[in-house]
Amino acid sequence: MSGRLVVFEGVEGCGKSTQLQRLQATLQGSDRIQDLQRQGAISQIVTTREPGGTELGQEIRHLLLDYRSATPMASRAELLLYAADRAQHVEELIKPALADGSWVLCDRYVDSTVAYQGYGRGLDLDLIHQLNQVATGGLLPDLTLWLQLDAAVGLARTRQRGAADRMEQADLAFHQRVQQGFEQLAEQHSDRIVAIDAAAETDAVATEIDAVVDRYVQQWYTPSLTT
């Protein structure tokens, strides 16, 4: 029995965390998912995030998002910290959950590193792909829900929430490069990345996500659904 890895990606303020929670609730209340669970095709619905999906990851998350110093964090150091968080996350949580037949809903994964540290920071993309490979052992998402939103709109949303973390404090030009990174990734990996209009109202975004996920459920579990 093998589970599914569903990842939420996007710029700051795109609504990933909210929509991940909405999808979790939808799946847990779905008759179709409950039927698949009774058949043993799906175990549990697990939610997690990067960075910070493990105890070690929580410490790394604090360093990455709350680091305060007169000396800025070097971009390569930032990259390696994200890789360390991911390596622990995959080994401790994601792979065991998938092996158990669970769905893992993850807030950010490998594409964020390409977009933020590659396009945003300007680090070598080949190096980033190598580090992602090392950290994940080649584990890619079964489905990536890219919440597509203009970077300026997303940053405006984050400011309404109050205090910004270290990544949110970066200038607009940085976040626009990140947005470009996600756009490029969506073109390159259309087999697993689905764009969702995150500028719409929260309920409308959730409805669009539900429709996409339902389509994938039918593809993944057709034999079980027809028995």
Image (tube, rainbow, N blue to C red):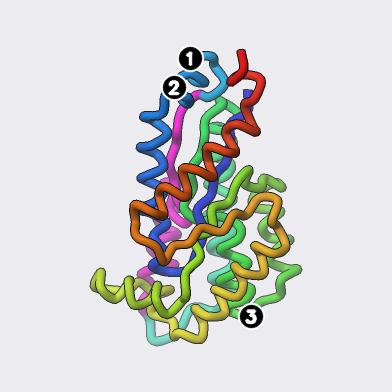
Q: Which mark is residue 122?
A: 3
- Mark on residue 159? none
Identify residue type, mark 3: Gly
- On the rendered image, what quadrant is the C terminus found in? top right
Q: Is residue 57 magenta?
A: yes
| Residue type pointed to by label 1 | Arg
Query: Marks 1 and 2: CB-CB under 8 Å?
Result: yes
Q: Residue at x 69, y 56 (%)?
A: 190
Residue depicted at 50% across the width and 53% down the height: 8
- Above or below residue 73? Residue 134 is above
For marks 3 and 2, the one nearer the N-term is 2
In the rendered image, which residue does mark 1 sit on?
38
**Left or right: 139 in relation to 59:** right
Dot 2 amino acid type: Gln
Could you tell whether 56 is left or right of 132 in the image?
A: left
Which mark is in front, 3 or 1?
1
> In the figure, 119 relative to 186: above or below?
below
Query: How far apart are the two marked residues, 1 and 2, measured between alpha carbons?
Result: 6 Å
In the rendered structure, which segment of residues is drawn in magenta? 43-68
Q: Which mark is residue 34?
A: 2
For this view, does 67 lie left or right of residue 89? left
Helix or strand or loop: what does disc 1 sit on? helix
